[in-house]
Image (cartoon, rainbow, N blue to C red):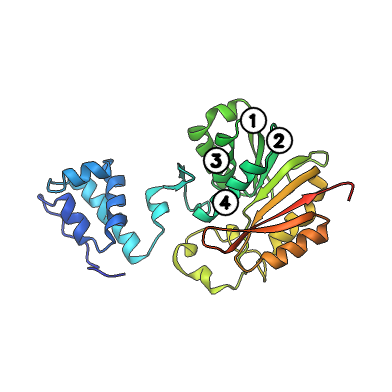
Amino acid sequence: MTGPTRSPELTCDITYDRLIASCGLPRLEARALLEHCCAKSREWLVAHGDERVPTEQAQAFIQLAARRRDRQEPLAYLLGWREFHGRKFSVSAAVLIPRPETELLVDLAIQIAAPQARLLDLGTGSGCIAITIACERMDLKIIATDRSPEALAQARSNAEHLCPDRLAGNRLEFRIGDWWQSIANEERFDLIISNPPYIAAADPHLGIGDLRFEPPGALASGDDGLDSLRTICAGAPSRLNDSGTLLVEHGYDQAPAVQVLMRKAGLDAVRTVKDAAGLDRITIGTWRQSA
């Protein structure tokens, strides 16, 4: 990362423009942090760039900028939110930061789900998948699970902010449990979706960039990264209605292995969908009781 690494000196006449220019961050990142600290819009900061910044707000910005610049902490955690599918989701170090690639999983679920379908989101994290679908498909009954109490608290908070009516109407429910633990034996779903951890435990990428700060349990899954996907694929048939569908996100090179897992579990019509970058991203399988 280029630019100065020394924090700007606090003076009584430091301006918004000077803070941005001297903090050592890319301009867009610096502006986002300053918007956050000053509770001002981007347009306001552009129009008032030569005005003095209140000392308390300047100090807060300098501290956050240093954490981003020197420790490379994720911008989403410093801001406390990340946009996903056009909505702002609160995030913290307790949950995975939503990625644009996962929007494909949401789009496919919205397209596939039949009217009044029951949907299960396994490993909901921030709740971005379940909540987005709940906002887009008011007819669905959605259950979202996670093994982390902190993650579920974050998801519920996001739901209370973004779709409180779905919670009040019991059309969106959150449960604690590791994969299938919170699902009763007799429960069945028309659609099961998941963006599980799928990185190999020894993958060196876990020590790079944002991944260093995200919860390890939401990223890594066994020696080959497939442990969670094995559990999900193996358990899906007994929780799906006839002609029900399983959709899972996975790594760009894991599609062949995930297809094998789905077919081994008895799923039919298995196929993989590529993301916007042309990489294998989502694999889909259908359960047919008569097959």
Residue at horizontal 20 percent and vertical 46 percent from the top: 46
Q: Position of residue 210 (x, y in %)?
A: 45, 62
Task: Name which residue type carries label 1.
Answer: Asp
Mark with earlier residue (4, 3): 4
96 in relation to 221, above or below: above
* Spatial CA span between label 4 and label 3: 12 Å
Query: In 3D space, how far apart are the residues under numbered discs 2 and 1 (Cα atoms)?
Result: 8 Å
> Does label 2 or label 1 sit earlier along the sequence?
2
Residue at the disc numbered 3: 132
Q: Please report contact status of discs 2 and 1: CB closer than 8 Å, yes or no.
A: yes
Report helix, strand or loop for mark 4: helix
Give the mark nearer the N terminus: 3 vs 2: 2
**Residue that badge 1 annotates:** 139
> In the rendered structure, which disc, 1 or 4, sits on the residue that comes first in sequence?
4
Q: Disc 4 residue type?
A: Leu
Cα separation, mark 3 vs mark 2, equals 16 Å
| Rendered residue at 49%/70% (across/down) | 207
Nearer to the camera, 155 or 194 = 194
Answer left or right for 164 relative to 145: left
- First reached walking from the N terminus: tag 4 or tag 2: 4
Label 3 crowd (10 A; few <14 / some 14-19 / many >=20): many
Q: Amino acid at mark 2?
A: Ala
User: Mark 1: which secondary structure?
Assistant: loop
**Residue 238: image location, x then y, percent:** 83, 47
Count of numbered circles on the image? 4
Q: Which residue is mark 4?
A: 104
Residue neighbourhood size for the residue with mark 1, other residues' Cα within 10 Å, grouped as few (<14), some (14–19), many (≥20): some
Give the residue at x 70% y 67%: 256
- Residue 170 marker: none
Could you classify mark 2 by the number of other residues whose Cα lies within 10 Å: few (under 14), some (14-19), or many (20 or more)? some
